[in-house]
Structure formats: C-alpha cells, structure tokens
Amino acid sequence: MKERVKRYMISRLEEWEKDITALADSIHVFAELAGEEYHSMEALCSYLEKRGFQTERGLGSQKTAFRAVYGEGKPVIGFLAEYDALPELAWPACPDSRGINGPGHGCGHNLLGAAAAAAASALADAMGQERREGTLVVYGTPAEETLYGKNQLLKEGYFKELDAALCWHPGRTNHCGEYQHKAMHSVKFFFRGRPAHASVCPELGRSALDACELMNVGCNYLREHVSTDVRMHYSYEDFQNKPNVVPEYGGVWYFIRARRRKTADEVLDRIRKIARGAALMTETDSEEKLLASGSETIINSVLSEIVYENMKLIGAPQFSEEDMSLARHLAEPLGLPGILDRRIEKPDGKIKEEPGSSDFSDVSQEIPAVELGTTCFIDNTPGHHWTVTAAAASGFGHKGMLFAAKVLAATGYDLVDDEERLGKVKEEFIRRKRENELYAG
C-alpha cells in the first residue's frame, strides 16, 4: 500500500517535470538577492495555489516570506523553500550598466525552492486521493545567504506548529541528512573618525580605515589561538573616499563560524575586544551591528534513515551523455574531470561536519528536521561559484532537483502514514536536544 502511494507521487512528479523545471528556471532568471525575492516568492506561491494550497504572502517583518497550507489536522509536516541568489554570480556573465556582473544562483536555491513546492504538491495530491487527515505547510524562507530568514521567522513565532520539517539542498553528492552546519554570527563593526586632507593636514584626521585595518590585523593574529573548527572571514564596508581624504567613516563585516554555538559566542566576545582596541589606537568611535546569529544543526538519524530508504527505492538519477559532456565542459577551466556523483551515502548515525552555515540549523534546534542533499553540481567544484550558477539551470541540475522532490514527497508520506515512526523521530529530537544543551553548559 505505502509503496503504491509513493509510486503514484513519483509518477505525478514525472508528469509535472516540465512545470517544475520552468518554475526553477524562472527563479534562476529572477536571481533576486536576500530580502528582495518578490518575483521568486510570487512564482512559488502561484505554483502552490494551482496545486490547492492556501497561501499567505509576507510573514511578520519579512515581505518576501510566505506560508502555504494544504489539509487539516495532525500531523503537521513542513517543507522549507529557499530562493535567494548571490551577488556577482550571474551565468552567463551579464554586466549591468556599470559593467558589474549581476546576481546569480551560485548556491542553487532556484532548484531548492522549486523541489520543495513540487514535493509538497505531490504529497497533497496523494493525501487528497486517500482523503487522509494531516496538514502540509510550505514555508518560503528568504535571505538564507545572510543567515536571517528562518532565524527571524522563528523569533516571530513561525515553524512551531510543525511536527517535523523537511528540507534539502543541491549539492555534489546524494546524502541523507547527517551533515551538521556550523554555528555562525554575522556582525558588522563600524568606526567613525575625523576627515582631513591626507597631505596638507593629516595630523588633524582620525582614520576609520586605519581602525578597520588594525582590527583585521588583530583578528588575523587571533586565528592562531582559536580551535581548528573556527572560521573568520571579512569584507570592508562603506569606504568611498579618495586617497587624499582621511576616511571619516567605514566598517568591516565579519562572519564568525564554529562547530558549536558556545565556541562562536566566545570568539565573538574576543573580536569585540579587538574592535575596541582598534578604536582606542586610532582615536575613533566604534559601534557594532549584529545582523544574525545561528546555531549548529541538530541531526536526526531516524529521519535520515527514512530518507535513505526512499533514495534507494527511487534510485539515483541517470545522467545522460549530454549531461556528462556539459559537466566536463564546465569543469575544464578548473582543471577538474567533470564527474557527477550518483552514489547514495548510507547514514550511520554519526555526525559529519559541514564547514558552511545555514539558518536551517536553528529550525532543527526547535523541531525535528532533516536536510538531505542530491547531486546537482559537479564533483569538487567550489561553492558560491559560477559553475554552480550554470549547473543550477542545467539538465543534470534539473534531474537532481526532481530526485530531491521525489525523496521529500516520499519521506513526507512516511511521516503522515506512520504515527509510530514519527514518534521515534520526536524521541530522537528530544534526546539530541538535551545532549546539545548539556554541552552548552
């Protein structure tokens, strides 16, 4: 019975393949940055409405977030959609009027959002056929690249209705959700000094740029004295002066990551001291703006096992010679062979460290959740790179997306159909949550 329903959902997704691909490609063309995803949100909402979902556009303080609901009663299963792009990653390169390369989906979120919407639609179709009780909620979550979207939605009370949340991310392998993202802080430090002519009267100036550079020197020395899982990266902010003007105002934007939130908090406190020291050395005033903070992922191995069962049932995508040829062509400038990995990683109950961060992790801190991955990108190509933007609109990218939609729909059905298994998912979440809290002290 269960496999028959899953085969039905798979067949529906295959029937809808052209529509799902068109949805993903339209979001790829929109390529809207974090917090600006109006067209992408509208495309996803319109798609879901045609599949019988009731949609709410704009959630709390976020105008490009949405909530789409189908059905009623328990359980309540969530599907998380992302759809923001990255700056300067358009493919093919499309310079704007200033000659600057525009935004692009260099993380594949166009595929991510489309597959989440399609999976929920297929499950809704099957539940309607069976007249089965249960509620499906698709959350459109903007601004993942700034670690803001889901965190802010959580603060404003969203997600808490869910019994479990299902998410996926395009990647280079087919994995079942045992990868733990790092905790992260996104924070800006600004300095205000005093402008002056840099040659005529430099002694009257107090340089915000000097403060930023001294702060970065201090942080670079700090790298020797933090644990090996810590990552610190920065970019300069708001400097538009000519060289003959002592810069009055400017700042530096830091991402601070660590395997555990406790460690990230400790490193941020040390960086704050460095910022104060830089201000003292340059006689400038400093201020801080904490943009977002996120925790590490709580892994749920019961959910990962369900995902694995469905991946094996469905089978990894078959990539054509055309797919492989394109992969080799895109990888050639990087000196890579252009491999598309079809293996399915078997979960083993152990946490695998993922060096990146995601606001998905904070959802996993509040409710049982899983984030699976499917092969949409070329093996060993870098993330946030033009090869990813190209892959996110390619035939092999589309196949990885459809595979993800099938797995998400089947996993959702398992949770709707099997109350006992959903109970085990919740039990593991409670156990892992307690372990996390004990570690944090």
Image (cartoon, grey):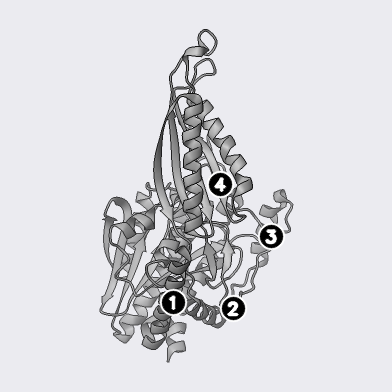
Regarding residue 22, the answer to whether it shows in the image is: no
Q: Residue at x 46, y 66 (%)?
A: 18
Numbered label attached to residue 232: 4
Q: How far apart are marks 3 and 4 (CA)?
A: 37 Å
Q: In this view, does 312 lie above or below 103?
A: below
Residue 163 found in image quarter: bottom left
Q: Mark 2 points at which residue?
A: 348
Q: Residue at x 59, y 49 (%)?
A: 385
Q: In this view, does 83 lie to the left or right of 355?
A: left
Q: Which amino acid does label 4 sit on?
A: Met
Mark 1 or 4, nearer chain start: 4
- Nearest-to-viewer mark from 4 and 2: 4
The answer to whether marks 2 and 1 mark residues whose Cβ atoms lie closer than 8 Å is no
Q: Which amino acid does label 1 sit on?
A: Arg
- Outermost residue, top side: 200
Q: Distance between the residues labelled 3 and 1?
A: 47 Å
Q: Distance between the residues labelled 1 and 4?
A: 31 Å
Q: How far apart are marks 4 and 2 (CA)?
A: 31 Å
- Nearest-to-viewer mark from 3 and 4: 4
Q: Nearer the viewer, residue 284 or 197?
A: 284
User: Where does residue 193 sit, x and y in percent of width and height?
Assistant: 43, 23
User: Where does residue 226 sit, x and y in percent of width and height?
Assistant: 59, 50
Q: What residue type is labelled 2?
A: Asp
Q: Mark 1 points at which residue?
A: 431
Other-residue count near label 4 (Cα within 10 Å), few / some / many at <14 / 14–19 / ≥20:
some
